[in-house]
Amino acid sequence: MDNKAIARMLSETADLLEIAGEDSFRIRSYRNASESIDSLPFAIAGIIADDKKLLEISGIGKGMVGHLREMFARGSLEARDRLLKQYGAGVLELRNVQGLGPKTIALIWDAHKVADLAGVEKLAREGKIRTLPRMGEKAEQKILKGIEDLKRISGRYLIDVADLAAQALVKYLAATPGVETVTPAGSLRRGRETIGDLDILITGKGCIEGSKQCEAIIEKVVNYPDAAEVLAKGGNKVSFRLKSGMQVDVRLLPPETFGAAMLYFTGSKTHNVALRQRALKQGLTLSEYGLFRVKDEKRVVSKTEDEIYKKLGLTWMPPEMRENRGELDLSEAGSLPELITEKDIQGDVHMHTVATDGKCTIEEMAQAAKDKGYKYIAITDHSKNLAMANGLDDKRALAHIKKIRAADEKFEGIRIFAGIEVDILADGSLDLSDSVLEEMDVVIASVHSHFNQTPEKMTERLLAAIANPNTSILGHPTGRLLLKREAYSFDAGAVFKAAARRKVAMELNSWPERLDLNDVHLRQAVDLGCKVVINTDAHHTSHLAKIKYGILQARRAWLTKKDVLNTLPAAQFLKALGRG
């Protein structure tokens, strides 16, 4: 079992215990262990026999050590199995419905002994949920919408989940005789925020269909340890389903057609259609096998994407741009933007420490950032309104600033800015005193509550936060959680225009569940004069690596280095925020 599988099982157990109304301390212990294991930079399987090393992990006590070993021994937990038998396996799916927390699921179970998606939907459509204590028609309609949303996104996976799955498969196949390259294609290569099927292309001398080496490679794919079910096998293609449920399509291609196949299977569909129409106007036809002349069906080019684009009178386009949003016109004119890269980022200014809900100290976060090559960071722990995260009140915030300043004095080669992620309250005011916020280098103002306000009220709320002279950055501006929670509604144009006037930057939160702002909003914000800051919202040193997903999102929005403030050196960055 890998770390994510263990963390997921612990989280499921915590929710099941909460539905059953069991001891809150026990529930919290499972949640703490889940969060810690999900953040580990190493595989817990490697230390599962070592009591001392296990107990060094935050949130792991002696009792949890026993539970972890039970999971490795039998693939499950007794408490989880017992409760799943009581409620049915469908209860786990209910956890993904917005508006259905463990307490509401327990309420429905107690009244109707129903704990599956179809059953709860039937109750809601019959008006039987609104009659329960603390519910009502509005709550019932929210549950129905949550069920509809869940059905719509079923079979989608966050980009980091797909990325890790691709990396593992690439590593497994890379050393196979006859294989030269193994490359993800499809929506993962284009940096889409959620992924359906995973496309993997293999090329090399051994990928000639019908050859013994090709058959051997196919057999190796079929025997992939994480494959749960082979869906199709034959010729040069294998389709299978991972244990996570994700479908993977693997294609073997000879080197001479690899470029055409990479272009075709990367997509997007609309980009490919535009390319094919362009080819036809030139008397050519484009397919996954190459670019051919129509009149005699002779292949012109096929080996690389670059040569295909050149033959069509275009320059090579980054995969993230291939959505048929005008990239072909820019390419033809030779004016494609030089998209931002991870190397351009000089600092990460949204991260949490043990002072609130983070897992590492100020010094540990700073060292990890320094090792990554950053020139500065900002420590931005939560404010008091986020009580479940042990948020800081005015007094604790001031003491925390002193600790950050002391750490900054101690560290060489990296600046440590004092900051805060301050809650935007329901009326648009900020959760800490202005006199305290004035002491901060970076103030990220974020919404963490009252998501159901009307669009007009939410717009007013965000405009009020932007108007506060202490606000530096608007954090994860739409509040969405991918595959879990829709963005709240507001007038994005009005908010972006106000932010541009006030020189308040928009955050691109790289956390894979957020990736907020999305690519369309990012483009709109920049076009209206906003600057962007790309952060990780890290709660552990290992989370700093997730900046890669924010960069992919930025590239999908065609952002360049000049659009992003944390590509600037430390002093210029502070000046751009009005804190210099």
Image (spheres, grey):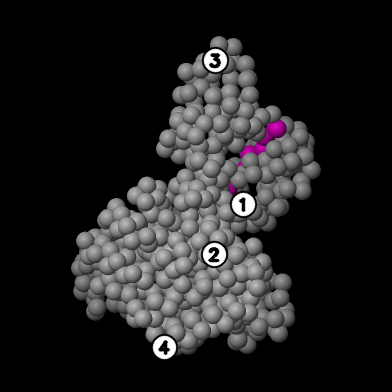
Asked whether the beta carbons under mark 1 and mark 3 sit within 8 Å of each other, the answer is no
Asked whether the beta carbons under mark 2 and mark 1 sit within 8 Å of each other, the answer is no
Q: CA distance from mark 1 to mark 4?
A: 47 Å
The crowd level at tag 4 (other Cα within 10 Å; few <14, some 14-19, many 20+) is few
| Closer-to-camera residue (571/170) | 571
Camera-near label (1 vs 4) is 4
Residue under label 1, please give it. 166
Q: CA distance from mark 2 to mark 3?
A: 57 Å
Residue under label 2, please give it. 570
The crowd level at tag 2 (other Cα within 10 Å; few <14, some 14-19, many 20+) is many
Q: Amino acid at mark 2?
A: Ala
Residue 163 rendering spot, x and y as whole percentages: 58, 54
Q: CA distance from mark 4 to mark 3?
A: 75 Å
| Closer-to-camera residue (472/312) | 472
Q: Amino acid at mark 4?
A: Lys
Q: Please, what secondary structure does the residue beneath circle 1 have?
A: helix
Residue 235 rendering spot, x and y as whole percentages: 66, 34
Residue under label 4, please give it. 395
Q: Please, what secondary structure does the residue beneath circle 3 have?
A: loop
Image side of residue 357 versus residue 412, left or right: left
Q: Is residue 267 visible?
A: yes
Residue 167 rendering spot, x and y as whole percentages: 64, 53
In the picture, the disc for residue 236 is none
Q: Is residue 197 visible?
A: no
Image side of residue 243 versus residue 461, left or right: right
Magenta stretch: give its range: 246-255
Tag 3 or tag 1, which sits nearer the N-term? 1
